[in-house]
Amino acid sequence: MKTLSKLRGNPPLIVCITNDVVKDITANGLLALGASPIMSGEKSEAAGLMQAADGLLINIGTADMHKKELMFEMAEAANKNNVPLVLDPVGYAASNFRRNLVDELIEKYEFTLIKGNQSEMMALAGLESTSRGVDSTDAGDALEIAEAAFEALNIPALVTGETDALVTRTRRYTFHNGNGLQGRITGSGCLLGAVMLAFISRSDGLTDGALDAVSYYNLCAESAAGQNPGPATFRTGFIDALYLNDDALLSEKDIRQHE
């Protein structure tokens, strides 16, 4: 059975500690995909949730000291229960608070995957970056940045942008589907982290799940952009596309493996 069919037949519970700005699109995107989202804000439920969860997303987009404590409790419980854990270091280079938070999370806990735009991942890898807030302003080679991030962090790394790149312990890939309107709506990258967890939880491994997740996500974006909509219409159409398509869409994926 294909991964998306498995996912929809047995909806994974994805716990999201995420950016306040993107909770709506994250919850609705996961529901449209076929997963079950929980937006948690209470650290005392960490132990119980992580016994039931199939994935945990930590997105630092609107982090504060309260959310820091929540992130630590959830990450600890996720590691204890072998729950896949994805980190989205939104705006990593924008402030010392964000840098210190991400650095401490990576030091203390084991992450299944880290994903970010080129500026964020360049900064994480110790490369020069011209990050402006949470936006990416670098136009470097995505695969080179992903390789540098993996080497620096020893965590499978996904770099998002016009071309996406994934580097794991044994493989290197670039993705060549998608549409520019993804960069014109708030939360498209943040939702991707949650979608990846849903696929990974129902796949035979991290790599297979990540490849299908990114490809399906970008192909749905192409589908939604087919009628040349504006950003607001695209956002609605994109959520519809996550719902309306199935595993057959992945026959159109354009993934290139690199030696």
Image (cartoon, rainbow, N blue to C red):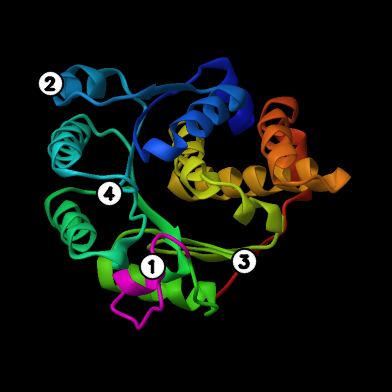
Residue at 12% x, 38% y is: 69
Amino acid type, label 3: Thr
Q: Residues within 10 Å of mark 4 (few under 14, many from 20)?
A: many
Side of 180 where 84 appears, left or right: left
List the residue tagged with mark 4: 111
Q: Is residue 219 above or below residue 66?
A: below
For numbered disc 3, what is the local secondary structure? loop
Structural distance between the alpha carbons of marks 2 and 4: 21 Å
Amino acid type, label 1: Met
Q: Main secondary structure of the magenta part?
A: loop
- Label 1 near label 2: C-beta < 8 Å? no
Q: Is residue 148 above or below residue 19?
A: below
Amino acid type, label 4: Phe
Q: Which mark is residue 172?
A: none
List the residue tagged with mark 2: 44
Question: Residue 4's spot in the image, x, y percent?
Answer: 61, 30
Structural distance between the alpha carbons of marks 2 and 1: 31 Å
Residue at 28% x, 78% y is: 126
Quarter of the picture containing the C terminus is bottom right
List the residue tagged with mark 3: 163
Among numbered discs 2 and 3, the one appearing first in the sequence? 2
Residue sticking out furthest to the bottom: 128
Question: Residue 249's spot in the image, x, y percent?
Answer: 76, 39
Residue at 63% x, 24% y is: 5
Q: Is residue 53 above or below residue 201?
A: above
Q: What span is colored magenta in the figure?
A: 120-135
Q: Which mark is residue 121?
A: 1
Structural distance between the alpha carbons of marks 2 and 3: 40 Å
Among numbered discs 1 and 3, the one appearing first in the sequence? 1
Side of 114 where 234 appears, left or right: right
Side of 183 where 121 appears, left or right: left
